[in-house]
Amino acid sequence: MVDLKAKPFNLSDKKIQWVEDTIKNMTLDEKIGQLFINLTLQRDPETLDRLVNKYHIGGVRWQGGTLEEIYEQNKYFQEHSKVPVLIAANCEAGGNGAVSEGTFIATGAACGASKTLDTVRDMARVGALEARAVGCNWTFAPVCDVVSNWRNTIVNTRAFGNDPELVAERSLAYMEEMNKAGLVCAAKHFPGDGSEERDQHLVMGCNDLSTEEWDESFGKVYKKLIDAGLESVMVGHICQRAYTKKFNPEIKDEDILPATLSPELLQGLLRGQLGFNGLIVTDATHMAGLTAAADRKHAMQGVVAAGCDMILFFHDHEEDIAYVREGIEDGTITAERLDDALHRILGLKAHLGLDELVFPEKEDLNIVGCEEHKRLAEKAADESITLVKDTQKILPVDPEKKKRVLLYFIESAPVSSLDGADPAKKLLVDELERAGFEVEAPKDYYEYEMESPSKFNKFRMMEHESREEFKKNTDLVLFVIDMKGYAKENNTRLTYSVSHSHEIPWFVREVPTVAVSLNYTNHLYDVPMMKTFVNAYGSSPEYIRKLVEKLTGKSEFKGQYNDIVWCDRWDTRL
């Protein structure tokens, strides 16, 4: 059972009494509702009223909505809920994880590349202040995964890196800044992503490290965070075979479960060996990593029975609640386990001061996206952008000597043609022209299709000018990659818009070429022929501006790469 006087709760007798009185006065339906975090997509009064008064939700996250809409939504939840709710955001890179108007400061990879802790502290502080302005009190971060597999793109940019000491240092700094601002953290994704390449949205993840390897990587990170007072842990739909077998030597491989359903990992490893006393929340329960391991009924009952205190997202409100109720009634979820979960949930709320809630004033919204935060974003870009290699010794580039630039911008296929082209392309063209370059930026297949869909557009992407004409008219090729992937494929590799496209690097032996990634750090595997490569970690205006400054020598490269950029290849280093 939880100890509410111990860390991370550190509750006074008065607050513990509030927890006890609140639980005592709950109906069974209200108790079940406390276990759930709702993904709020609709904000009409009828929907919000139903969530509060019928389903009695314990927490909320959301998607979409303007700054003011999110503020009013969260204010409604806190003013109308019998028990104040935990309001969570994904502040992994700044305030943009709370609201679209928020400030992107730095990804985890950028924080890891920066040689100063200022970058992660600025990212966390801005994220906390902007999230708090709309009523948030909980962040699903830090991402404290240790990325040892270069093929992993699920947490490639979200995690701080491959060195456990660095990951722990950055994670602790993040947590300190969040706590200073009054938010609590949920470190993720226990037992650890980054050692394999698959996406738990699509398949059960497998952390296949030995127990000794795990202790020296993920274990070291989690132990340091827990000892420092980590309030909550988000558990991934990721199994850890070695530790499952250590705590249950008789278990068969076919019975090994993701951590969300595994008492061996939750009770034996996290609570027992690591001594975690805080709240455990599942990762999103619509992921195939969970649905592949159990049907919905047994998943809803099983995650709570195994040791998770809160369930991230409903599938069907009525159905999920009924499943949990049935599990309580038939003893799958014991009375003790339910009581323990409720004490942790209410204990976290008391720790946050929700027993005496004061909601932010609307004037506080002015801090979201403010000029000071944009300045910190530019500072983060300056500290993190990394020159991985320049074996051809081309940098810095002088616009007077290499004026005519051909920009190949390699982007992911848009979800819809209505989304338009990647806005970073125009930002980059504008910054290059401002620096004194003459820029030609050919349309890619997606842009042709947006202008006028045609079966001939793919052939337009195959057309080439003569090599001699090309060399006469081009001083420099800038090859920029902004690939994105999420819950669609198990890893994201560089992909050209059509086969045999003129985007494919035929030009590297014709004119000087510089390659830049605005996102993933592992693209050298697909373009090892690039002799100059930069990891820029972001496509916001601040990052684009600083990138051009560094390419032209107006600012030095300050970031440091880790060895996964070489993708275990000799040719990527040449």
Image (cartoon, rainbow, N blue to C red):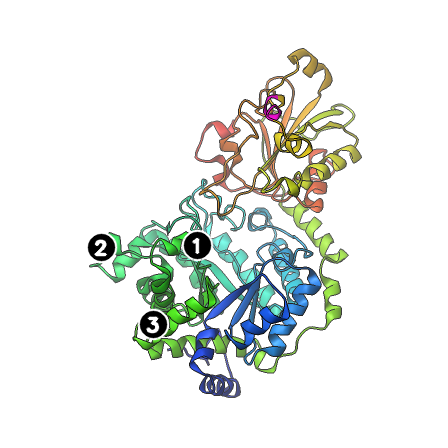
Nearest to N terminus: mark 2 or mark 1: 2
Q: Mark 2 sits on what residue?
A: 252
Q: Mark 1 sits on what residue?
A: 287
- Dominant SS of magenta comes to helix
Labelled disc at residue 239 = none
Residue 207 in percent (x, y) is at: 36, 51
Judging depth in this view, the residue of 472 and 297 nearest the camera is: 297
258 shown above or below 554: below
Nearest to N terminus: mark 3 or mark 1: 1
Q: Any magenta on residue 456?
A: yes
Q: CA distance from mark 3 to mark 1?
A: 21 Å
Q: Residue at x 75, y 57 (%)?
A: 372
Q: Mark 3 sits on what residue?
A: 327
Residue 562 in percent (x, y) is at: 51, 42
Res. 348 visible in picture: yes
Q: Residue at x 35, y 51 (%)?
A: 213
Q: Residues within 10 Å of mark 3 (few under 14, many from 20)?
A: many
2 shown above or below 415: below
Res. 343 visible in picture: no
Disc 1 marks which amino acid? Met
- Helix, strand or loop at label 3? It is helix
